[in-house]
Image (cartoon, helix red, strand yellow):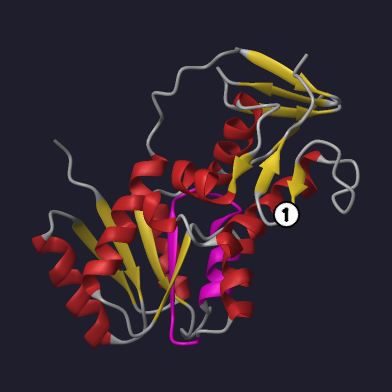
């Protein structure tokens, strides 16, 4: 069986060496990069299964690297940062990161998050009630994992697709914050409502006529989200 590969992009050699050793002993193949430019080159050359990306790096910082990476790849990314501000976390998630971990961190926690990200990156075995459903101008094709808005295909990230899929398959039923977080990210994320709000906002901008007045994905304050009209 082919081993999963992880790219570690961090300008601190001590962190690269430590994480590389930890991941290798946990069964991963590891690539390392000292800056954002080298990280992008390695992703294109080797197509690793996941990237662990530091924010503060020379040449290209983590945000610039992630923004460019998302123009050609949907590879899962976990952001590492010594800057623990909520703004940085939201910015990283908005640019397409799958998870965010503040320094200093436990290597065991990073391993757990890598496993969680990899689990949700795998194709699911969910039973599809429908092959295709429509909500107003939005059509969801479960077989192709495709979404069209006014007959134009919307480019969703993996997380956006998983969220929309869960909500669509449970149309008419309120999905609690903790339920959506557990289904899409894993039970260890059931209390991280901020990450859910960030991704729901991104999804609305891609499928709603007016993201500030959503007609498809409705918020139930202090509870969760619901698509509350039946599919066509």
Q: What quarter of the picture does the N terminus occupy?
A: top left
Q: Secondary structure at mark 1?
A: helix
142 sits left or right of 18 in the view: right
Residue at coordinates 29% horizontally, 52% vertically from top-left?
115
Residue at coordinates 65% horizontally, 28% vertically from top-left?
168
Q: Which residue is mark 1?
A: 201
The residue nearer to you, when weighing 36 against 220, is 220
**Residue 69 drawn at (x, y percent):** 54, 59
Q: Can residue 63 be found in the magenta stretch?
A: yes
Residue at coordinates 22% horizontally, 87% vertically from top-left?
14
**Residue 47 is at least partly visible in this image:** no
Q: Is residue 21 above or below residue 134?
A: below
Q: Is residue 17 above or below residue 175?
A: below
114 sits left or right of 147 in the view: left
58 sits left or right of 134 in the view: left
Residue at coordinates 90% horizontally, 47% vertically from top-left?
210
Q: What quarter of the picture does the C terminus occupy?
A: top right
**Residue 5 drawn at (x, y percent):** 25, 53
**Residue 161 is at least partly visible in this image:** yes
> How would you rate the neighbour count of disc 1 (Cα within 10 Å): few for under 14, some for 14-19, many for 20 or more?
some
Q: Which residues make up the magenta segment?
A: 62-83
**Residue 49 drawn at (x, y percent):** 34, 49
**Residue 93 drawn at (x, y percent):** 58, 63
Q: Is residue 206 above or below residue 230?
A: below
Residue at the far front in the pictured view: 222
Q: Can residue 201 be found in the magenta stretch?
A: no
Give the tally of numbered discs. 1
The residue nearer to you, when weighing 121 against 197, is 197
């Amino acid at each position: 069986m082919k081993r999963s590969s992880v790219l570690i992009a961090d300008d601190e050699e001590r962190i690269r060496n430590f994480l590389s050793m930890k991941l290798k002993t946990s069964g991963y193949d590891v690539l390392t990069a000292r800056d954002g430019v080298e990280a992008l080159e390695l992703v294109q050359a080797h197509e690793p299964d996941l990237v662990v990306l530091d924010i503060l790096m020379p040449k290209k910082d983590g945000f610039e690297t992630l923004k460019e990476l998302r123009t050609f790849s949907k590879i899962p990314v976990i952001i590492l940062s010594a800057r623990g501000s909520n703004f940085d976390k939201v910015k990283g998630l908005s640019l397409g990161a799958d998870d965010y971990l503040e320094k200093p961190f436990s290597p065991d926690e990073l391993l757990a998050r890598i496993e969680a990200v990899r689990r949700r990156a795998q194709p699911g075995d969910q039973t599809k009630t429908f092959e295709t459903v429509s909500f107003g101008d939005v059509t969801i094709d479960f077989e192709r994992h495709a979404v069209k808005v006014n007959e134009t295909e919307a480019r969703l990230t993996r997380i956006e697709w998983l969220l929309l899929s869960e909500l669509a398959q449970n149309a008419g039923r309120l999905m609690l914050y903790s339920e959506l977080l557990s289904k899409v990210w894993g039970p260890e994320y059931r209390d991280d409502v901020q990450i859910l709000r960030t991704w729901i906002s991104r999804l609305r901008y891609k499928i709603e006529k007016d993201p500030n007045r959503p007609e498809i994905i409705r918020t139930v304050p202090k509870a969760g989200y619901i698509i509350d009209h039946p599919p066509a």
